[in-house]
Image (cartoon, rainbow, N blue to C red):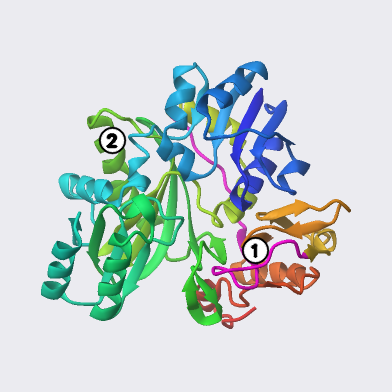
Amino acid sequence: MNILLIGSGGREHALAWKLRQSPLCHTLFAAPGNAGICEEADCVSLDVNDFSAVARFCKDNAVKLVAVGPEAPLVAGLADALREEGISVFGPSKFAAQLEGSKSFTKDLCAKYGIPTAAYATFDNEAAALAYLEQHGAPIVVKADGLAAGKGVIVAEDAETAEKAIRDIFGGAFGAAGAKVVLEEKMKGEEASFFALCDGENIVPLAGAQDHKRAHDGDEGPNTGGMGAYTPAPVLDEAAQARVMERIIEPTVRAMREVGSPYVGVLYAGLMMTDEGPKLVEYNVRFGDPECQPLMMRLNSDLVELMQATAEHDLAGGSADWSERAALTVVMATKGYPGAYEKGSVISGVERAEEEPLVKVFHAGTARNEAGELIAVGGRVLNVTALGDTIAEAQKRAYAAVEKIDWPEGFYRHDIGWRAVAREGGERGA
């Protein structure tokens, strides 16, 4: 079949790489793609915000399945528009995508259906939020309600930081995403991510992962979209995964069905592993980035089959097969990220890096210049991903590949996977 993949990041390169391996995939299109995706797919110039244009493209090119990588088109309603045209889509409806698009929607859903999460309150004006802060104090978590490109969450250790965050959000720092503010208790524990496929009724659990949000070694520096990830997550053993399914994923899928908008796609639960058990931090309505990259390295199942069954409400009795190996991704980013950074620096050595066994370099913010050289055009640029019998082995292999890449304008963390490696009895760094 012909497939259209929406997106241009490292997550989408990993999905393209995996989709292309399926014997069911005839032609893979990607919009807009990147330099790496263009090696796997026919990259097309298509405005994904123009839903009519996307539908026309699908009909003109006999596209039978659309896989939506990022959250913004889903929150805007792309899946609804395509389904109205009879096109199968891997991704939730606009209403269901509120699980990521509106933090207050998700918190209210959790409260109504008894899904464990942090205590919270939602505000649509600054004065009321500041009054709540004065009453409850810090530490506290301040969240812009809507999509804010991963930057709308401030973990405030003191009241001064929290007050500034509230004023900034209501002052327009995140645009329309800050029309409401959610204030939450700061939960204690270790963060992890869990993924499951949902066809509206049936659920296929996938796997757990852990990422590294901070920019620099030792979990220091500003928050980013993620500087690395690994899977499986040791903190999410079989018992913990079963509890997540029973107390968080399954009730959510039932709830969405009851409110009249069955959830279709991948459901990504950001979790805090507390002393009371796993609690929901937030939901995402797409694969994580960079968690998707190591997940795709471990996935033995045919991704097209899984996505098609999800989109066509046919997951009953399904399952996903995983490699027993671990996988780890190191993100290489442009110096200055997540702040201001320069574009256009030349990267070499990616081919040498991929000569390492069990290594794949997934592209994120990359392009080709007029001379055909690989250049950096984004903040997060490369995802160097490796398999290993243990996370420590995958870590060692990934960093050996990183060392073969020549990019003076880039930087990366040197301790991705340190928690898991420590659990395995190894040292913190690579």
Callout 1 crowding tier (Cα within 10 Å): few <14, some 14–19, many ≥20:
few
Instruction: Label 1, secondary structure: give it.
Output: loop
Name the quadrant containing residue 303. top right
Image position, residue 159 (x, y; %)? 23, 79
Magenta-colored span: 317-345
From what the image shows, is residue 213 above or below residue 106? Answer: below
Quadrant placement of the C terminus: bottom right
For mark 1, what is the residue? 389
Image position, residue 276 (x, y; %)? 24, 66
Image position, residue 33 (x, y; %)? 67, 43
At 52% from the left and 78% from the top, the residue drawn is 422
At 39% from the left and 32% from the top, the residue drawn is 93
Image position, residue 190 (x, y; %)? 38, 70
Indicate yes or no whether the magenta region holds residue 296: no
Quadrant placement of the N terminus: top right
- What is the number of the mark on residue 256? 2
